[in-house]
Image (cartoon, grey):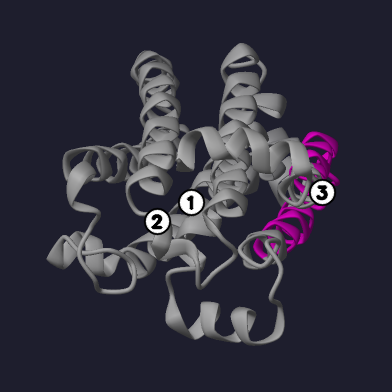
Amino acid sequence: MSSSTAVAVAAGGPIARERMERMFYLVSGCLLLLIVALGFQHFYLQGKASDGGPVTQQIVPLVFLHGILMTAWIIAFVVQSGLIVSGNRKLHMTLGVGGAVLAGLLVIVGVATAIASVHYNPDSYKTIWGARRFLSLMFTNISGFAVLAGIGLIYRRRPEVHRPMMLLATLFVAGPAGFFRIPAISGVIMGSIHTIIAPWIPMLILGTLLLVIKSVMTRSWDGYLAKGFAGVILACVLQYVISGSAWWYHVAGWFTA
């Protein structure tokens, strides 16, 4: 290390900030992977639904495919972050092509799984908020992921945009599903918040914490991460408004009938 580099690192300069930023995304990815592993343990270990019951029989292959793709995305995020930490940018870019394909498949299969789930097993959502309202949550989840991942892929050569968008996309696809399947968390949320926004709460709390943690680690404010997270909050608000509207009940009825 040259004397100028040593000074920059010691002073918390751009080199030190870049290293901390890279480490932040790797740690964040590992945390999201842990959350999903805890939330989907019944699925991973026993092939069962989140409540320990059987998966909707008519769509078992589709549900398993969706689970595999979602898990693959999160693992890919961790691997890609690790490659950047290790300085292997070339392999990172090469694997990014597969990541784009994976994102497209996840959106397509996610939409199909959401529709098939409420169509074949609408009664399973009666004790929550109803199949039609729950479908709005699933569509928002998939759409949010698609938009954020799409922006990240478009700006793949601009790390300051690419990294936060990919993190938020992963948070969007993993957060609600993972958190809300952890009994210790879902029990508290369901016991105090009974509206359709309940599944978003843990995700929004974690997103806020990640924004703060990144600012502390890098000693700088990430405007792109903040703007992206503001978009996530807006999507959750819009979903809440739309889910109770008459026109959404009419549209959702096409799928639940």
Residue that numbered label 2 is attached to: 33
What are the residue bounds of the magenta stretch? 206-234
Query: For mark 3, does the 10 Å Cα neighbourhood hold few (<14), some (14 to 19), or many (20 or more) residues?
Result: few
Tally of numbered discs: 3
| Quarter assignment of residue 97 | top left
**Can residue 12 be found in the magenta stretch?**
no
- The three-letter amino acid code for the residue at tag 3 is Val
Name the residue carrying label 3: 241
Marks 3 and 1, the one that precedes in the sequence? 1
Q: Residue at x 24, y 38 (%)?
A: 62
Cα distance in 3D space between marks 3 and 1 = 23 Å
CB within 8 Å, label 3 to label 1? no
Which amino acid type is marked by label 1? Answer: Ala
Say whether marks 2 and 1 touch (CB < 8 Å): yes
Measured as percent of width and height from the top left, residue 241 is found at 82, 48
The amino acid pointed to by label 2 is Leu
